[in-house]
Amino acid sequence: MSHEHFCYLTGHYWQCEGTALRGGDTEPSVCVCVCGLPLEGFDHSGCHDCVELLACPEHREEGRQRMEKARKEHDRQRAEFGFDKK
């Protein structure tokens, strides 16, 4: 059985088989419902219909590159405006 995630980078749903790679992780982790149970193997008919915003495998590298670019820009602005000084 599979479930859906929403790729926030390009705005489409994608099918997941129960584990997905998140953030800076190097290994996929189990997808968990807002109720705290794994999405696969449990009845979630009583749970709110929530969808995790998660870059799909096809766009994951693009998301990583965007985050790295934003992090560098944030660091540059901190230095430029003196926010990194105590």
Image (cartoon, rainbow, N blue to C red):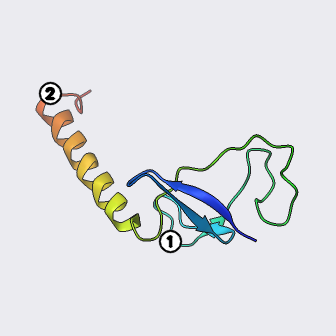
- In the rendered image, the vertical position of residue 21 relative to residue 6, given as above or below: below
Residue at image point 81% right, 43% down: 47
Residue placed under numbered mark 1 in the picture:
26
Q: What element carries label 1?
A: loop
Depth check: 51 or 80 in front? 51
83 displayed left or right of 13: left
Residue at image point 76% right, 71% down: 1
Whether the residues at callouts 1 and 2 have beta carbons within 8 Å, the answer is no
Residue lying farthest front? 12
Three-letter residue code for mark 1 = Thr
In terms of sequence position, does the residue under pointer 1 or pointer 2 come before the other?
Answer: 1
Residue 44: x, y in percent? 83, 51
Residue 81 is tagged as: 2
Residue at image point 68% right, 60% down: 31
Disc 1 crowd rating (10 Å Cα; few below 14, some 14-19, many 20+) is few
- In the rendered image, the vertical position of residue 73 relative to residue 56, given as above or below: above
In front: label 1 or label 2: 1
Separation of marks 1 and 2 at Cα, in angstroms: 34 Å
Residue 35: x, y in percent? 80, 45
Three-letter residue code for mark 2 = Phe
Residue 65: x, y in percent? 29, 60
Residue 43: x, y in percent? 88, 56
* Quadrant in which the C terminus is drawn: top left
17 displayed left or right of 53: right
